[in-house]
C-alpha cells in the first residue's frame, strides 16, 4: 500500500527501532481495496511501545484514553488523522475477529507487506456484502446496528441475512447507547447521497420506531426528497441539508428530535420552518411571514433548497415550477439589495444587524420600497 503521509512513514521507522509491530486496519484498508483514497490512518500496534513519546517528539496534538487495559491515541498531523490502538488480543488475527464487520476486519502488515484476512473480508468486498464478524457483535455494541446501515448505504452493499437477523434481535438494546453516539451515526446516514435507500428496511424491522417513538414518519416524502437531492447532486451546508431531510422525515416532531439527538438548535429551527410551510416555497411568493424568515435565514441557499424540496411533490410541471420560482426570486433579490451600507451608516453598530434583518423581512412580506425602509430606520 502507498502511504502519502511522510510523517506516517517516520512513525513506522520509529516503531521498527523499538521493535514494535504495526498493522494498518479498518476503513483505510477497506477503502484501499475498493480503490478509494483515504487521509485517515487506522493503526494497531503491539502493546510494548509508548506511543506518546513519538507524538511528543514531533510536537503533534493528540488525545489519549484507556479502556479495558487497551490504550488508544488519536492525533491530527497536517490534514490527516491517525488513530493508533494497542492490540486487543494476543495476535492480529484474534484482534480482527473482535471487530464489527468483515470488510473492516482486514489488516495490512506494513513490515511483511501482506494482508491479514482471517474472516474472508476481501471476498465480501468483492461481493459488495456486509457481514458481522461474530454472532454477538450487535449485543456487544448496539450502535453497530446504525453503522450497518450507514456502511450499506455509503457503499451500496447487500446485508447478509444472518447479520440482519442478529441486528433485529439487538434493536431493543439500542437505548443503552448514548444519544450523542446515536445522533452522530444518524447524522452520517442522513447526509449521505441517496440515504433513503435503506430507510424502508430500517422501518420494517422496527429500528425507526425505536429511534423515534410516537412520531408520524413521512417515509414517502423523505424518499422522494432525498432522491431529488441525490440525483441533482446538490452541495449544501451540512446543517441546512440536515434540517431539510429531518423536516421531511419527521414533520412536526423534527425540532424536538433534532435537539434530542444533538443536531443543534439551529437545525431544529430550520427544520421547523420547513415543516410549517410543508417544504414548499409556494406561500413565500404570496408574502407569508414565516417563509420570509426562511429566505432571510437560508439566504442564497433558499432557492435551490426550495426548488428541490418542492420538485418531488409539486402538481405542476417541474420546468414551469422552476421558471416561476426564478422569476419571483430575482424580483425579491433585487428588493433585498436596494438598501446598501451607506443607507444605514447612521445606525448604532450594535443595532445594525437587528435592523437589517427586520427590514429584509418587511421587504419580502409587505412590499416595502426603499423610501419606506429609510423611514423605518429614522
Image: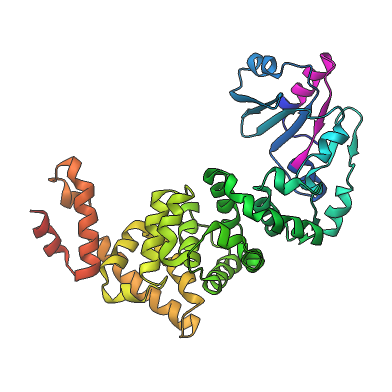
Q: Quadrant of residue 89?
A: top right
Q: Tell me if 142 is positioned left or right of 246 in this view.
A: right
Query: Which residue appears at 59% of the width and 70% of the height?
Result: 227
Which quadrant holds the N terminus? top right
* Residue 159: percent from left, percent from top: 77, 60
User: Is residue 339 something one can see in this rendering?
Assistant: no
Query: Which residue appears at 64% of the width and 53% of the height?
Result: 146
Q: Tell me if 125 is positioned left or right of 68 in this view.
A: right
Coloring applied to the structure: rainbow
Q: Quadrant of residue 91?
A: top right
Q: Please tell me whether residue 30 belongs to the stretch shown in magenta.
A: no
Query: Which residue appears at 68% of the width and 14% of the height?
Result: 53
Examine the rendered structure and indicate whether residue 323 appears above or below residue 210. Answer: below
* Residue 25: percent from left, percent from top: 78, 37
Q: Quadrant of residue 75?
A: top right
Residue segment shown in magenta: 9-26
* Residue 352: percent from left, percent from top: 20, 47
Examine the rendered structure and indicate whether residue 102 appears above or below residue 157. Answer: above
User: Is residue 114 something one can see in this rendering?
Assistant: yes
Query: Which residue appears at 36% of the width and 63% of the height?
Result: 273
Q: Tell me if 32 is positioned left or right of 328 in this view.
A: right
For the residue pair 254 and 3, the one nearer the viewer reads as 254
Amino acid at each position: 500500500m502507498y502511504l502519502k503521509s511522510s510523517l506516517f512513514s517516520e512513525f513506522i521507522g520509529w516503531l521498527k527501532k523499538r521493535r514494535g509491530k504495526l498493522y494498518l486496519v479498518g476503513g483505510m484498508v477497506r477503502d484501499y481495496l475498493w480503490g478509494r483514497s483515504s487521509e485517515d490512518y487506522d493503526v494497531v500496534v503491539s502493546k510494548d511501545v509508548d506511543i506518546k513519546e513519538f507524538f511528543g517528539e514531533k510536537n503533534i496534538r493528540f488525545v489519549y484514553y484507556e479502556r479495558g487495559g487497551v490504550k488508544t491515541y488519536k492525533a491530527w498531523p497536517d490534514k490527516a488523522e491517525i488513530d493508533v490502538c494497542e492490540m486487543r488480543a494476543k495476535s492480529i488475527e484474534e484482534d480482527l475477529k473482535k471487530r464489527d464487520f468483515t470488510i473492516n476486519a482486514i489488516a495490512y502488515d506494513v513490515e511483511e507487506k501482506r494482508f491479514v484476512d482471517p474472516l474472508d473480508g476481501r471476498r465480501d468486498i468483492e461481493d459488495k456484502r456486509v457481514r458481522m464478524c461474530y454472532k454477538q457483535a450487535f449485543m456487544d455494541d448496539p450502535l453497530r446496528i446504525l453503522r450497518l446501515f450507514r456502511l450499506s448505504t455509503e457503499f451500496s452493499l447487500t446485508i447478509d441475512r444472518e447479520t440482519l437477523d442478529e441486528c433485529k434481535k439487538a434493536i431493543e438494546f439500542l437505548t443503552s447507547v448514548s444519544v450523542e453516539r446515536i445522533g452522530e451515526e444518524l447524522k452520517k446516514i442522513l447526509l449521505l447521497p441517496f440515504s433513503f435507500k435503506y430507510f424502508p428496511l430500517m422501518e420494517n424491522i422496527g429500528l425507526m420506531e425505536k429511534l423515534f417513538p410516537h412520531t408520524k414518519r413521512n417515509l414517502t416524502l423523505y424518499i422522494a426528497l432525498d432522491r431529488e437531492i441525490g440525483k441533482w447532486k446538490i452541495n449544501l451546508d451540512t446543517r441546512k441539508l440536515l434540517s431539510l431531510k429531518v423536516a421531511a422525515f419527521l414533520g412536526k416532531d423534527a425540532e424536538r428530535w433534532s435537539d434530542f439527538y444533538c443536531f443543534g438548535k439551529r437545525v431544529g429551527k430550520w427544520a421547523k420552518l420547513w415543516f410549517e410551510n410543508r417544504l414548499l416555497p409556494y406561500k413565500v411568493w404570496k408574502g407569508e411571514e414565516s417563509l420570509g424568515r426562511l429566505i432571510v435565514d437560508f439566504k442564497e441557499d433558499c432557492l435551490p433548497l426550495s426548488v428541490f424540496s418542492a420538485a418531488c411533490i409539486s402538481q405542476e410541471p417541474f420546468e414551469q415550477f422552476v421558471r416561476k420560482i426564478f422569476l419571483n426570486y430575482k424580483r425579491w433579490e433585487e428588493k433585498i439589495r436596494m438598501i446598501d451600507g451607506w443607507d444605514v451608516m447612521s445606525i448604532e453598530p450594535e443595532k445594525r444587524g437587528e435592523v437589517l434583518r427586520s427590514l429584509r423581512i418587511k421587504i419580502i412580506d409587505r412590499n416595502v420600497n426603499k423610501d419606506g425602509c429609510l423611514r423605518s430606520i429614522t
